[in-house]
Amino acid sequence: MEQNFLNIGRISGQKKANTLGDWVFKISMLIFGIISAYYLIIRALPFLIISEEIYNPYYYSRVVWIWPHVLGGVIAMIIGPFQFIPRIRIKYPRFHRVSGYIFLISILVSALTLVFLITTSSSSLVIDVGLGIGGLVWLVTAILSFVAIKNRKVAQHREWMVRCYMITLAFVVFRLVIDIFSSLELTNEPDIVALASWMSWTLPMCVTEVIIQGRKIIK
């Protein structure tokens, strides 16, 4: 009898921990979602308007590559969240598939144009390598999520989609790191950009992996 009560207590404790963990996760995602929406509206959407007033001379000379890069990233950022809504996935499977293809194509366009932007960049090698590896990881996670679902490995597909979307938000982390460190005036601008180029994708990947693996352990 005592053992049964102990088991019930453990189960109840696990449920409370899971519930608390879910709420912390949801609130964290809500806050980050608001921050992402802010940077999307302020820092990304204006670049969809091709104008010398918006692009400075350096970027305007490369607008042919920057515009599709930004467009692909914006589409992926907007479409991505709909891929994780169970009701849409179950009730509207066709929409889920089509939007998934659009999401993948958008990433392909954005990642591939990033390659050209890096090769013609005047930034330091540290920045170029950081952004280049981030773009490669972004592309790989997108491809692996696609391969997983084609092989009917749904669980792995969902995990890779989470990783992929978190790296899609690397732009947000990049701008956030620059704004925070610039406001604190801790170092010079080139160093801040170099730090942001690496943190923009390593930080989301680390956080995502902790969440994915942590949920498996708790369950």
Image (cartoon, rainbow, N blue to C red):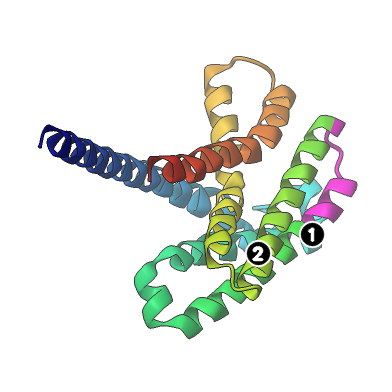
Can residue 22 be seen by looking at this rendering? Answer: yes
Q: Residue furthest top?
A: 186
The residue at which mark 1 appears reads as 113
Q: Work out whether residue 75 or residue 154 is closer to the camera in this orientation and state it.
A: 154
Give the mark, 1 or 2, whose residue is nearer the N terminus: 2
Q: Residue at 77%, 51% (x, y): give it.
A: 136
Q: Residue furthest left?
A: 1
Number of the label disc, if any, that sits on residue 72: 2
Can residue 120 be seen by looking at this rendering? Answer: no
* Residue 23 coordinates in the image, percent (x, y): 28, 44
Q: In this view, does 217 lie above or below 190?
A: below
What's the amino acid at mark 1? Thr
In the rendered image, which quarter is residue 1 located in? top left
Circle 2: element type:
helix
Q: Is residue 124 in the magenta section?
A: yes
* Residue 63 coordinates in the image, percent (x, y): 77, 59
Circle 1: element type:
helix
Q: How crowded is mark 2: few (under 14 residues within 10 Å), some or many (20 or more)?
A: many
Q: Work out whether residue 77 or residue 70 is closer to the camera in this orientation and state it.
A: 77
Number of the label disc, if any, that sits on residue 154: none
Q: Is residue 212 in the magenta section?
A: no
Pointer 1 and pointer 2: residues touching (CB < 8 Å)? yes
Q: Residues within 10 Å of mark 1 (few under 14, many from 20)?
A: many
Q: Work out whether residue 28 or residue 207 is closer to the camera in this orientation and state it.
A: 207
What's the amino acid at mark 2? Gly
Q: What stretch is highlighted in magenta?
A: 112-125
